[in-house]
Image (tube, rainbow, N blue to C red):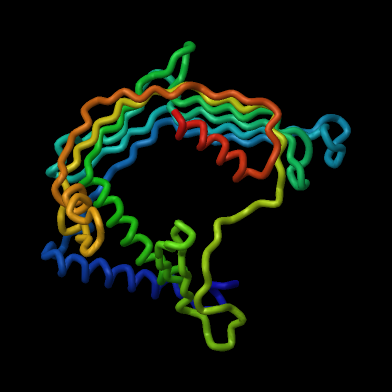
Amino acid sequence: QYLKHHNVDSSDIEKKVTRERNEFNQDENVDGKAFPDVAQIILRDLTIDFQHMWNDDGPGHGESERSQLLFNIHSIMILDRSPSAENSIVFDSTSKENFFDFCVRTRGPLNTDLIIVDLVDLNLAYGDGKPEIITISTSEDLVWRMLDLASRVMTATAELAGVELDLKWDDENGKFKVAISDKRIDDGDDIDRVDTYEPPRSDMLYEVRLIRISPFNLLLSFKRKPQSSRYRLIKGVRGARLTNYFTTHLKFTIDKAELRFQGYMAKDIKGPPDRIFDTLKAVYIAQ
């Protein structure tokens, strides 16, 4: 209804995308070529399975309902497609075990204020009682190219979605704030032209009877070769010279650092999803 209200024409969008691509190619002096490749993601054997079951009593009889969600990925490989990349393999989980093995089982209806979760089970490259190695090897150059790609995607989709996002740091609250501007809104629309995005909060509660996460091991390599043009120099504050050195000149290499994370198991956790997520985040940040 939103797209229809603002007369969004798919053929018009296609023309705009083509025009943007041509302008980019002209700016980069690569007429006739596509956008430069950044990365390639290879997924093998991805499976998503959802089941919702009832006992003989049929729907609407409380705990007679059962649901199960399975999400499995056997392996993931991410390749750096830059011709100048020293190591083309950025992320590798090609082992005999599933890299990502996720299972959620619930009891009772899913449209209530309190959802009973019997099990949340997550295995990361884990099998036969031990974790496999997950290899990560990247550089600051790839990080910047991924950020450039994300910026281009946000710019391209802003016109498609009819909004523009402006990310700003709020010194008072110590958080980023996202200003959302809708380019398609007419003067008669009952929507503010600029609003502040707030993270979604859920009033729904979950009672998780068992949550289990396997141990996992990371083999991390990272090379920092700063691009001074990416950083704005700091002036007129204490420690500016040292900070500028760190951002524009400091080079270092992390070579095959092994990071071992212990497994996690907890019972009878109750609360909204963001609180449960914050609990898990605190556990792994501490490790």
Is residue 26 rendered to the left or right of residue 48?
left
Q: Position of residue 242 (x, y in %)?
A: 19, 50
Q: Answer above or below: position of 24 versus 250.
A: below
Furthest residue toward bottom: 187
The quarter of the picture where residue 157 lies is: bottom left
Q: Position of residue 221 (x, y in %)?
A: 24, 31
Residue ID at (62%, 30%): 120
Q: Answer above or below: position of 132 versus 228.
A: above
Q: Nearer the viewer, residue 260 or 114?
A: 260
Is residue 18 rendered to the left or right of residue 46?
left
Is residue 52 rendered to the left or right of residue 227?
right
Q: Answer above or below: position of 226 versus 49.
A: below
Q: Nearer the viewer, residue 134 or 51?
A: 134
Q: Nearer the viewer, residue 152 or 191?
A: 191
Q: Total of numbered circles in the picture? A: 0
Image quadrant holding the C terminus, namely: top left
Residue ID at (54%, 33%): 71
Furthest residue toward top: 128
Q: Nearer the viewer, residue 128 or 181?
A: 181
The quarter of the picture where residue 230 lies is: bottom left
Image quadrant holding the N terminus, namely: bottom right
The quarter of the picture where residue 174 lies is: bottom left
Residue ID at (83%, 32%): 64
Residue ID at (52%, 68%): 196
Q: Position of residue 78 (x, y in %)?
A: 30, 37
Q: Position of residue 56 (x, y in %)?
A: 86, 30
